[in-house]
Amino acid sequence: MRPTPSPPGLAPAFAAGEYADPLRTLLLTHKEHQGFALAGPLGRVLGSVVDGVPVRSAPLVLVPVPAHPAVVRARGHDPMLRIARAAAARRRRDAAEVTVWKLLRQRHRVADQSGLDATGRAANLADSMVIDPRVRSALVRLRRPVQVLVCDDVLTTGATAREAQRALEDGGIGVHGIVCIAATRRRSLQSLPFSPPAH
């Protein structure tokens, strides 16, 4: 799956399905309306996407796209971090070695992306993320090869994922792929099979 047009150099991207109901409602309820119980079902969906990424035997590191601290405070939680942790827990139950690292943080709060085209989103996000040097040092101290997957909720133009990838690569950390729960319909999808999570 790749957005059309795709940001230059975007790592391979994978999503569970189209950004439409039921995924859209699940994501919005969890993200904007404190539907905390949905982190588990959404984590299972993201975990199924991780399952479909071709990887070697190295441990997987999931890196959620960061939210600005002010946004986290306003929402009462960090939605992508919660979902990524639920996905990692699901994969560990299957004996996979998967961890979640908060490697990225936002330098500054970005403007609302809704209504912006691909060029506008890229400009809005340019240089907005930076790697946390303390977390990077902790990862390096593991002295083990890992495969890093950037995690986001929805892939639209790919600008957010590409900015996260840029920040990681600038910090010397390669990105194996981008995993998302959904992708917008107007993009070219090569999505994985999707079944609504069981309740």
Image (cartoon, rainbow, N blue to C red):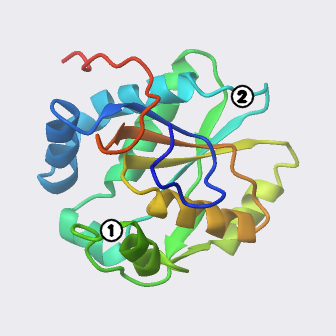
Q: Residue furthest right?
A: 143
Going 73% across and 34% down the picture, which residue do you hit? Answer: 59
Question: Number of marks in the image?
Answer: 2
Residue 130 in the image: state x and y as whole percent. Answer: 59, 75
Q: Compared to 140, does 54 lie above or below?
A: above
Going 46% across and 56% down the picture, which residue do you hit? Answer: 158
Going 14% across and 45% down the picture, which residue do you hit? Answer: 29
Considering depth in this image, is 176 or 30 the residue closer to the camera?
A: 176
Residue 106 seen in the figure:
yes
Q: Is residue 123 left or right of residue 34?
A: right
CA neighbours of label 1 inside 10 A, class few (<14), some (14 to 19), many (20+): few
Residue 156 in the image: state x and y as whole percent. Answer: 36, 53
Q: Quadrant of residue 36?
A: top left
Q: Compared to 87, does 48 lie above or below?
A: above
Going 67% across and 36% down the picture, which residue do you hit? Answer: 60
**Disc 1 and disc 2 in contact, CB within 8 angstroms:** no
CA neighbours of label 2 inside 10 A, class few (<14), some (14 to 19), many (20+): some
Q: Is residue 158 left or right of residue 149?
A: left
Residue 5 in the image: state x and y as whole percent. Answer: 47, 55
As shown in the figure, which amino acid type bears the numbered disc 1? Asp
SS state under label 1: loop
Q: Compared to 99, does 63 lie above or below?
A: below
SS state under label 2: loop
Could you tell which of marks 1 and 2 lies nearer the N-terminus?
A: 2
Residues at marks 1 and 2, CA–CA distance in whole angstroms: 32 Å
Q: Which residue is mark 1?
A: 117
Q: Compared to 3, does 93 lie above or below?
A: above
Residue 35 seen in the figure:
no
As shown in the figure, which amino acid type bears the numbered disc 2? Val
Q: Which residue is mark 2?
A: 55
Q: Residue furthest front?
A: 5
